[in-house]
Image (tube, helix red, strand yellow):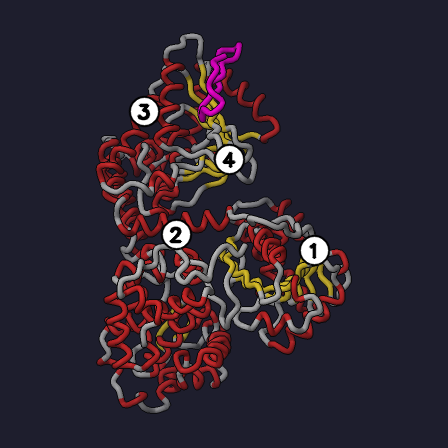
Amino acid sequence: MIAHSPKTAWTLRLDDDGIAWLTFDRPGHRVNTFGRETLDELEARLDEVAADDSIHTVVVVSGKPDSFIAGADLEEFSLIHDEDQARALSERGQEVFAKLASLSQTTIAVIHGSCLGGGLEMALACDYRLVTDHKSTSLGLPEVNLGIIPGWGGTQRLPKLIGLAPALKIILTGKPVSARKAFRMGLADGIVAEAFLADHTRRFVERVRTDAGRRDVLARRRRVRSRVQRAIEATPPGRALMLRAARKNVLRKTHGHYPAPLEAIRVIGETFVHPSMRTEADALARLACTPISRNLVRIFRSSQQLKKRSAKDGSGVRVGSAAVVGAGAMGGGIAWALSNAGIPVRLKDISWEAVAQGTSSAAAMFAGKVKRRRMTAGEMNLAMHRISGTVEYTGFGHVDAVIEAVVENMDIKRQVLREIERCVPRHALIMSNTSSLSIDEMAAALRHPDRFLGLHFFNPVNLMQLVEVVPGEKTSHEAVVSACELVRSMGKIPIVVGSCAGFLVNRILLPYIIESAAMFEEGVPVERIDRVLVEFGMPMGALALADEVGLDVGYKVAKVLEHAYGPRMRVPDGFGRIVQDGTTIGKKSGRGFYIYDSGNKRPNDEARALASNGHTAGGSNGEAIPDADVLDRAILVMVNEAARCLDEGIADDADALDLAMVMGTGFAPFRGGVMRYAQERGLREVVERLGELASKYGERFEPAPLLVQLAEGGPGFDGSVANGKGGERS
């Protein structure tokens, strides 16, 4: 046995069979990540292996119970300031993994849990890979989501192993694949249940020590790649065709805003036949120091911090069972999220027909997971059995949490909340999935408001990770802690926000839609408004988004905000006329700002006529409004409202606010969020531009006091609490 310090991340244990077990267990860290120190330690262990003739096989395993290797240490990565540093880090990882790949001994990576980024690149440097069939096991190269490309050999080894097309899909999407899919595509050479992993590993070692066993494994890798795929990859025209198709697909999805996937295509194309680690390292170095990469890394780190954050004091209720009242689209989605987390849930509505609809919504979400092979039909069956329906409050006497998701009407919600409180135990959390109504006004209907708060899910629940946690004035700290832990258990990201009309995300998003509707009323064509915003980086235009949400829903929330905030959120009369028409309420009715027909959409001339009421508002000519004004009116109105939210302590800090807008609305991630965009554009320029817009279009553009203060020499939106009112709420 080779002994090492207990503080060592890499340990090497040699057994009597000539197998060296190389274990990665980074001290003081929940998951294993690579930094310079751990790379240096790995190299030292590899040197020991290379010098020991008694070792015939090296098995790489993780000492963490639920993950393999999560990738590079982002804390170290964020300290990179120039291309030379980035290149040096890339070359260092390449050097160490090349030493692993060149060992004379057989090398096997045994993967249980997440194997991402540098973790997968290290596994690719091994001769073989075994995976457990556990649902937590996933393999991927998510670097493009951080604005970079794999830099430790991933662009070189993965295409050679599994083929050009599947490698491009993994690298360009950044999405991990399950253990089963990894095995099917030849990324893994064996798959086994976790309980039998040790025995199976030894059997696999014995198998690949024989010529016949090695030939079987290599033959299987070849079989999983179709003849057509191999034939296309074998010729320059075939490869060029695949690379052009990949580039076209990336441009269609990203509109050219994200250089990393395009750079990955170039690197893979240039090195598929003639490998070049230097080409990979140079490309990573160019990308790593760009504002786009820094913004994407910042967003990712913020999301990870919110996922991991735990209460500094106090303890909450562990939710072992729950109930949802209201079986509409949101209620069914919330029931799905609870069941998906393994929590039994009662789904209540006033009729069995409504309950059946909610249950069907949950079933459709699970069916989608089965179709994508994220779960089996048997697992779906078990999950659906965790959802039970009712039209009474039977079963509520034993639940730990209830989420109310009835219609967005204060009187109805208060009545339902009173009914819930009479039926649940004293310790149970009571939460409302409201998008804009006052938490304190609802809490006033309860005898014990200390256990009540808002829990705002975003639609569709199965796709949207963000959940706003909204304490009221009398909500206890323990209730907030419990709610945040419940959200995390559902695999979502909780962000604690202050209670105000619209909370955080809708309060900032609605002015964007309202202003776009105002420009539409002034005569700016709908397709031009949306084109300008998509070119900026939004996932869809503001008016297309309004159609997706439903104009009736958006208008109702907008009127709530108008009532709360006055003239700066005045809803255009034309928006009201469109909604009041009754048949023009968005995509669900086939008619909104656009007409939807057989999967196509085109501008709705009737909506134009309704908005203008037969004439152009204010006598202005929408065609004369420049694209620069269209963009700034829509985006800077969000910046202005976001600054007010920070000033009022609705969000703890700029980082949390930006994460909420990226995850809750799709605000251009490569721009880093609303506040980061303002910071990078220049706060003085933003304030001056808002002043220009105010003089041209109205007082609603008057710069928020915090913007003016920071533009005059403040520290800027650096992630700290802007006004000292925030802090750790959860």
Q: Residues within 10 Å of mark 3 (few under 14, many from 20)?
A: some
**What SS does tag 1 mark?**
loop
Check if residue 560 falls in the magenta segment.
no
Q: Position of residue 414 (x, y in %)?
A: 66, 74
Q: Position of residue 177 (x, y in %)?
A: 46, 41
Three-letter amino acid code at the position of disc 2: Ile
Q: Mark 4 vs mark 1: which is more N-terminal?
A: 4
Q: Is residue 253 visible?
A: no
Please determine whether, in this image, residue 336 is positioned above or below residue 711: above
Please determine whether, in this image, residue 228 is positioned above or below residue 331: above
Residue pointed to by mark 1: 400
Q: Are marks 2 and 3 in contact (CB under 8 Å)?
A: no
Please determine whether, in this image, residue 342 is positioned above or below residue 11: below
Q: Are marks 3 and 4 in contact (CB under 8 Å)?
A: no
Report the mark closest to the observer, 4 or 1.
Answer: 1
Residue pointed to by mark 3: 98
Pick whichever, 160 or 579, lies toward us.
579
Report the mark closest to the observer, 3 or 4.
Answer: 4
Q: Position of residue 427 (x, y in %)?
A: 71, 57
Report the mark closest to the observer, 4 or 2.
Answer: 2
For the point 63% across and 45% down, which residue is it? 379
Report the mark closest to the observer, 2 or 3.
Answer: 2
Q: Is residue 183 left or right of residue 87?
A: right
Q: Main secondary structure of the magenta part?
A: loop
Q: Is residue 209 left or right of residue 348?
A: left
Res 75 → quadrant: top left
Res 635 → quadrant: bottom left
Residue pointed to by mark 2: 299
Q: Determine the CA span between mark 3 and mark 4.
A: 23 Å
For the point 49% across and 22% down, which residue is it? 6
